[in-house]
Amino acid sequence: MLGRKLADRLFTGFCIASAALALIPLCSMLYTIIAKGVSVISVDFLTQLPAPAGEGGGFGNAIQGSFIVVGIASAIGIPLGVAAGMYLAEFPNTKLSRAVSFTADVLTGVPSIITGIFAYALIVVNFGGFSALAGGVALATMMIPFIVRTTEEAMKLVPWELREASLALGAPRWRTTLQVVLSTARFGIITGTLLTVARIAGETAPLLFTAFSNRFWFEGLMQPVATLPVMIYTYAISPFDEWHAQAWGGALVLVLMILTLNILVRLAAGRRW
C-alpha cells in the first residue's frame, strides 16, 4: 500500500512538473511580447497608416487587411470544409469519400509556403497581380482540410439511433443530415472552425506570395492588401529601431486577436446548445 501511494505521488509530481515546464516557453513568449509591445499600443497605432521611419504611423491598414483576408478565407473555406466533412461522415464508403479523405490528409501536412505558391499560380499569375482574394484563397486552402476532419469527427459522434429515428418518422435523408445530425454536432464543428481561424490568422508565408502588402487602406478584392503577419515581418527585418518597436506592437495585437478567438472557443465549450 505504501509503495502504491509513493508511486502515485511521484507520478503526480512528474505530471505537474512536466506541465510547468511546458508553460515556461509560452509564458516567456507572452511576457516578452507584452513587455516590448504594450508601450507602442495607442489609438494612433491602431488607426493610422504606416509612416516613414521617425514619423510615427500605425498598423491600422494591416489590422483592417487581416480581418478582410481572414474573412474571405472563412467565407470560402468554412462552407466547403463543412460540406465535405458532412459527406465523409454520411457516406464513408464511396470512392469519392475515400478520395476526399486522402486529399484532406495530404493537404493537412502540406507546408504553408507551398499553399502560397499554389494560390500564386492559380490567382496571382492568371489575374495579373497580388490581391486580397489571392490571400483569402491561400488561407482557405489551409483551412479546408482541418474543417473537413473536424466536421467529420463531430458528426461521427452523433449516435446512429438519432438518424434512424428521424428516418423512421418519414424525414428524407437530406433533412435528417441537416436538421438532426448537423444540429447535434454543431458545437464540435463551431469549436474546430474557430480554432482553425485562429491558426490561419497568424500565417505569413502564404500571404507573401498572394496578398503581398501595401501602405494604404483596403482598395478592393483584386488589389494588394496589408496584413498583420506580413507587416510584422517587414518591420522586424528593417534596420530601424522604431519599426522594430512597432513590430512588437503588431505582434501583441495579433496575439490578442488569436487569444480572443480561443476565449470564444472556451465560451462555446461551456455553453449548452
Image: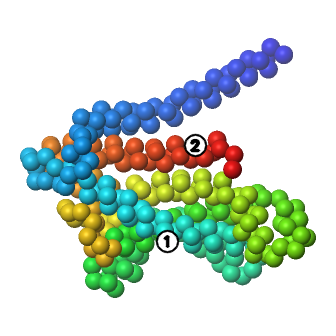
Quadrant assignment, res 209 = bottom left
> How many neighbours does mark 2 have within 10 angstroms: few (below 14), some (14-19), or many (20 or more)?
few
Residue extending farthest to the bottom is 126
Secondary structure beneath label 2: helix
From this view, report whether residue 97 is shown above or below residue 260. Answer: below
Q: Quadrant of residue 92?
A: bottom right
Residue at 65 percent across and 68 percent down: it is 85
Provide the residue designation for mark 1: 76
Q: Mark 2 points at which residue?
A: 266
Is 204 on the left-hand or right-hand side of 147?
A: left
Q: In this view, does 169 lie above or below 232?
A: below
Under circle 1, the secondary element is helix
Q: Do the residues labelled 1 and 2 touch (CB within 8 Å)?
A: no
Q: Report the amino acid beneath label 1.
A: Ile
The location of residue 14, given as percent across then percent down, is 62, 26
- Position of 100 with respect to 262 (left or right) is right
Residue drawn 43% across and 72% down?
A: 137
